[in-house]
Image (cartoon, grey):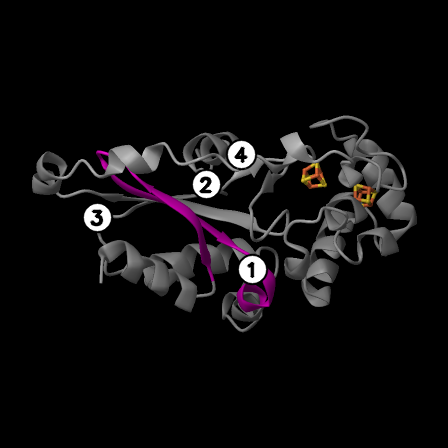
Amino acid sequence: MSRGVTLTRALESAGFLVLDSRETAAGTEFAVGSAGQTFWDAVTASPEWHANPNDPVDAFTRRAIKEALAGYPEAQITFVFDADAPNFVVLWTQTFARIAQSDLGLMIHPEYGLWMAARAHVVLPRAQEAIVEDDSHKSLINKLQFDPCASCRDKPCLSACPVGAFTAPKTFDFQACADYLLRNPRCFSAGCDARASCPYGQSWQLPPDQAHYHQNRFRKALGSKS
Ligand code: SF4
Ligand code: SF4
């Protein structure tokens, strides 16, 4: 079994997903994300859930990914919440063939749609002798890029928001969304109507308790006590 496969399994056992990977001359890069109930069950069962109520998701993510990759001391891990992390939308959509920027501006994936989150970018350096002997990465780099929005004729995501927070591709009226959520929290209770209207990843919509958690955090950040 290759090291990439065992690394993927270690991450999956901890509740994460490898959204895509690619081989380069320098090594293997992995887009590590999360989606669905498995991740949420791992977060809410973790010690961080009670010990770090202000930020249990990031605290869990940092500890669990480091533990999962303990057998790969050479792995370079950049967490999406690191202070010096690059913009993952730019990094991943330019790096991975299965991750695109959607017309909502969010990343979109062929299986998980708009319902996945970026957690970490992992690079497993290639052994020196393998760099010399193996050029198999060349064919993988040219994989066809997933680009669903270019052929999505009706673009239901741009008209589903009740306050028109998305009026054109990749423009988001944050204030319109925030104002509406303060008045009508039910809007967000299933995780955003605009996202839910996209045909990709329908079965990966947020579990209700996870949607509720994000809704509460968002509303608290906006200053609502309710
Ligand atoms: S509904 Fe269409 S345009 Fe909107 S994110 Fe999904 S695929 Fe892209
Ligand atoms: S949460 Fe509601 S108001 Fe905000 S963008 Fe989504 S559908 Fe629009």
Residue sitting nearer the eye, 122 or 175: 122
Q: Which secondary structure dominates the residues rendered in magenta?
A: strand
- Check disc 1: other Cα within 10 Å, few if <14, some if 14-19, many if 20+: some
Residue extending farthest right: 183
Q: Position of residue 20 (x, y in %)?
A: 42, 47
Q: Which mark is residue 89?
A: 4
- Tell me, yes or no, if residue 218 can be seen here: yes
Badge 2 or badge 1: first in the primary sequence: 1
Q: Which residue is mark 3?
A: 74
Residue extending farthest bottom: 45
What amino acid type is highlighted by mark number 1?
Answer: Pro
* Distance from mark 2 CB to nearest ligand 2 atom below 8 Å: no
Badge 3 or badge 4: first in the primary sequence: 3
Q: Which residue is mark 1?
A: 56
Tell me if 57 is positioned left or right of 220 in this view: left
Q: Which residue is mark 2?
A: 82
Q: Position of residue 16 (x, y in %)?
A: 46, 59
Numbered disc in front, either 4 or 1: 4
**Cα distance, mark 2 to mark 1?**
15 Å
